[in-house]
Image (tube, grey):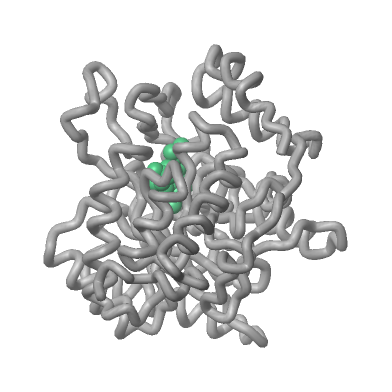
Amino acid sequence: MIDLFPITAPLLFRFDPETAHGLTIKALKTGLVPAPRGRDEPSLRSRVWGLDFTNPVGLAAGFDKNAEVVDAMLRLGFGFVEPGSVTPRPQPGNPRPRLFRLVEQGAVINRMGFNNQGLDAFAERLERRRDNPRRAAGIVGANLGKNKDTVDAADDYVIGARRLAPLADYLVVNVSSPNTPGLRALQGRAPLRELLGRVLDARAACKLARNPPLLLKIAPDLTAEDKADIAAVALESGIDGLIVSNTTIARPAEIPEPLRAEAGGLSGRPLFGPSTAVLKEIYGLTGGKLPLVGAGGIASGADAYAKIRAGASLVQFYSAMVYGGPALVHRIRDELAGLLRRDGFESVAEAVGADHR
Ligand SMILES: Cc1cc2nc3c(=O)[nH]c(=O)nc-3n(C[C@H](O)[C@H](O)[C@H](O)COP(=O)(O)O)c2cc1C
């Protein structure tokens, strides 16, 4: 594909990261970004939860918080996209600056705090898309968050699930962002059981011909007890899968001052090792019974392949795009196909969890 990123990157990097992101979304919305999908190798076709993915490489939540560029991102070659996190009411998020580049580390720190236009704007865009015969093919999830000032968190996820279950191919309960006070405490055994039970009831109450799969997105910063609890609750509750993982509050040694002192979640290259280790552990704890989505630090086909071998049926990335541009999705996808072929796998499904065998 024609890759304009080498030309636009120096310009974008002259802006602060949030302004650069806003300009990127604007450019994508014009529909003028050249976007030949290229060819998805047949080995990349994946059927998960009864959904057909042309390739297993997705766009992680947080890039398109308001579902503004779903089709543009699918046209760039992603097998699936996950707009959000969306909260029931619009909210401004934390004060700026709240997004930081760590160029040498290939990393990002963010404390956005679920800035978004709210559920109505989000749902209306997905409705318009549903009614548009020229929409791009591909799987579109919806990532649900809670408003900062909502006391009973489950209420917000129920509101989101009710509204979006008829519009999204899958739903994500995100209880792992580090930038909403109290959110990650919902990963504990008792609150998680109640939360997932209520969201599953809300989904059932929609009486859809086909329920969208419900996934839980977890943090990488969990104790052994947390992980065992999450795996047990995930299996007994009847949810459909897990996304592993969100950003980390840890600051590995390679993160220099003064940025290491910035509050927020760290993503990108330094997250690859820790998030892949958690993914592998969760695959072991769930016995391979639940499809997992691997996220955290993916920047190459080899990274995506390592997540799949550790137990992921699908993968997602975001931060690497800041440094590699949107054409990176082609590289990751094509390199992944090459690695599957090298190791004699005819499909992604055959390679899932290979490191456990
Ligand atoms: C700027 C930014 C905003 C994000 N916002 C969200 C969000 O709203 N909801 C969510 O579930 N994850 C969010 N994430 C986390 C990503 O979806 C992903 O889980 C994480 O960044 C790890 O992947 P990566 O290393 O490829 O970026 C955000 C990440 C970044 C960098």
Q: Is residue 357 above or below residue 41?
A: below
Q: Is residue 307 shown to the viewer in this render?
A: yes
Give the x, y percent position of residue 165: 60, 72
Residue 342 vs residue 239, the one in the foreground: 342
Report the number of numbered marks: 0
Image position, residue 36 (x, y; %): 75, 45
Residue at point 21% right, 34% down?
251
On the picture, is 3 further left or further right than 272?
right
The answer to whether residue 175 shows anywhere in this view is: no
Residue 135 sits in quarter: bottom right
Residue 155 place in picture, x, y as percent: 44, 66
Tell whether 131 sits left or right of 86: right
Considering the image in quadrants, where does the C terminus appear?
A: bottom left
Percent coordinates x, y for residue 219 in the rendering: 29, 54
Which residue is drawn at the image coordinates 28% and 26% (left, top)?
262
Nearer to the camera, 188 or 332: 332
Quarter of the displayed picture in which ligand 1 can be seen = top left
Residue shown at the point (32%, 35%) measured from the top left: 264
201 to the left or right of 46:
left
- Asked whether 328 or 63 is in front, the reply is 328
Q: Considering only vertical position in the picture, is 348 above or below 118? A: below
Q: Nearer the viewer, residue 237 or 159?
A: 237
- In the image, residue 310 sits, relative to residue 350, either above or below, namely above
Q: In this view, does 341 lie to the left or right of 222?
A: right
The structure residue drawn at horizontal position 51% and vertical position 39%, both measured from the top left corner, is: 115
